[in-house]
Structures are given as structure tokens and as C-alpha cells.
């Protein structure tokens, strides 16, 4: 994310292919000032070490996802993959925290369920929701620390409570809106069983 006219950017969840991220930053003429992580699953943090090699910027993560993050290399081996263990985060995110980075103001909302320390970043008219909710679906809850009732509660309280026109930028797939997901997402139509 970045403000129009500025080359400073905030990098959120640099994925698992640092070369592609660095190539995109170069193409856009963007220089990151921070890396924010919605959560610590491999497909969201695999590129952290490579990006930090080129841009040694502060890294932000919620403390509840530290066990996943601190064991990322071992996590990768469980899936038959290899990755460099990323360095420890510089800052721990907390619910309600306001971040002002590269001229971008974001509110941190704690939204566990997909992972124990998942957060959502809410800005002006948009929310970066990681793997909480997707267009027509929700994040998986079968990985360690996942919980379907907790995820549904997080979605209801931290995402569906946003204005209906809020754009939801998801960790995978197309963007959507609060209104669309509230009206048509089959996983969210009846959340009465969520705690």
C-alpha cells in the first residue's frame, strides 16, 4: 500500500516468492518502510527473509502467531518445502493499535480463528483481511491453532461490523465487499453456532 505520488510503501504479507515481490516493488518504483503480517502461515511469510535482505525495514506481527512464525522453517519441512527462517519481528501488533506508515493509516483488529494471532488491517474504505474471509468463502481452520467458531466470531465482530461498502482485500482471490459477503457468503449466512 502507498499514498499516490509517494514512493514509500507498506508491504503486507510478502508471500512465498521474494523475487517476485522485489520485482514488483522495482517495477512500481516503491520502497517499503515496513512489513506487516496478517498471520504467520508459510504462504504469507515465506518471502520475509528475502525482502528484508534487500530492504531491512521493521517487521510487525501479533504475538499469538509467534510460535508459528518462530518455527517457520520447521513448518515448511512438514509440507516438504525448504525456507529460510525469517528474523524475529521488530514490533508486536495489538488490537486497536493505530499504525501510520508511509502516509497510510491502518487500524489493527485482532481476528483469530484461521490462526491464533491473525489480524486485519483497516484503512480508509478498505480492510486487508488476510485469510479470514474470501469472496464466497472463509479461511481454513484445520491447521494448528485454527478454530471455526472463533473465526466466524472474528469475521462477525471485526469484519462484518465495518461499513457495508468497505472493500475487502483478501489473502487469496478477488476483492469483495462487506455487503456482498454479508448477503451471499454461504459460510456467513447463519453464524448462530459461533461463540
Image (tube, rainbow, N blue to C red):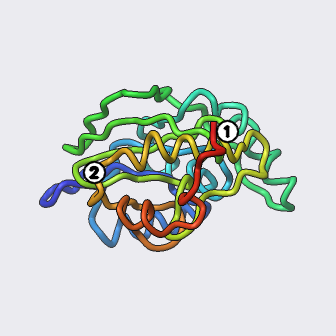
Query: In this orientation, which residue lies closer to the viewer: 186 or 127?
Result: 186
Callout 1: helix, strand or loop? helix
Query: In this orientation, which residue lies closer to the viewer: 27 or 131?
Result: 131
- Is residue 167 depicted above or below 85 in this figure? below
Coordinates of residue 157 in the picture (x, y in percent): 46, 39
Coordinates of residue 5 in the picture (x, y in percent): 12, 60
Coordinates of residue 3 in the picture (x, y in percent): 18, 54
The mark that comes first in sequence, 2 or 1, is 1
Residue at the image point whose x is 66% and y is 36% from the top: 116
Nearest to the eye among marks 2 and 1: give it. Answer: 2
Asked whether the beta carbons under mark 2 and mark 1 sit within 8 Å of each other, the answer is no
Callout 2: helix, strand or loop? loop
Residue at the image point whose x is 59% and y is 39% from the top: 112
Residue at the image point whose x is 22% and y is 49% from the top: 124
Q: Is residue 23 left or right of residue 42?
A: left
- Considering the image in quadrants, where does the N terminus appear? bottom left
- Is residue 77 depicted above or below 60 in this figure? below
Q: Is residue 86 left or right of residue 121?
A: right
Counting every numbered tag in the picture gives: 2
Circle number at residue 69: 1
Circle number at residue 153: none
Residue at the image point whose x is 43% and y is 70% from the top: 23
How many other residues sit within 10 Å of disc 1, few (<14), some (14-19) or many (≥20)? many
- Considering the image in quadrants, where does the C terminus appear? top right
For marks 2 and 1, give the CA distance: 32 Å
Q: Which residue is mark 2?
A: 163
- Is residue 47 depicted above or below 115 in this figure? below
Quarter residue 153 falls in: top right
Amino acid at each position: 500500500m502507498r499514498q499516490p505520488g509517494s514512493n514509500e510503501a507498506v508491504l503486507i504479507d510478502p508471500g512465498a516468492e521474494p523475487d517476485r515481490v522485489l520485482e514488483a516493488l522495482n517495477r512500481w518504483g516503491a520502497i517499503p518502510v515496513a512489513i506487516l503480517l496478517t498471520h504467520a502461515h508459510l504462504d504469507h511469510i515465506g518471502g520475509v527473509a528475502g525482502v528484508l535482505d534487500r530492504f531491512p525495514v521493521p517487521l510487525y506481527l501479533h504475538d499469538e502467531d509467534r510460535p508459528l512464525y518462530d518455527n517457520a522453517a520447521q513448518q515448511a519441512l512438514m509440507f516438504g518445502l525448504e525456507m529460510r527462517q525469517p528474523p524475529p519481528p521488530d514490533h508486536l501488533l495489538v488490537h486497536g493499535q493505530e499504525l501510520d506508515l508511509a502516509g497510510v493509516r491502518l487500524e489493527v483488529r485482532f481476528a483469530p480463528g484461521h490462526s491464533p494471532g491473525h489480524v486485519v488491517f483497516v484503512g480508509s474504505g478498505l480492510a486487508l483481511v488476510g485469510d479470514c474471509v474470501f469472496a464466497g468463502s472463509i479461511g481454513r481452520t484445520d491447521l494448528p491453532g485454527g478454530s471455526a467458531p472463533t473465526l466466524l466470531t472474528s469475521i462477525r465482530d471485526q469484519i462484518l461490523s465495518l461499513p457495508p461498502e468497505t472493500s475487502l482485500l483478501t489473502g487469496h482471490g478477488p476483492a469483495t465487499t462487506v455487503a456482498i459477503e454479508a448477503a451471499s457468503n454461504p459460510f456467513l449466512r447463519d453464524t448462530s453456532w459461533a461463540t
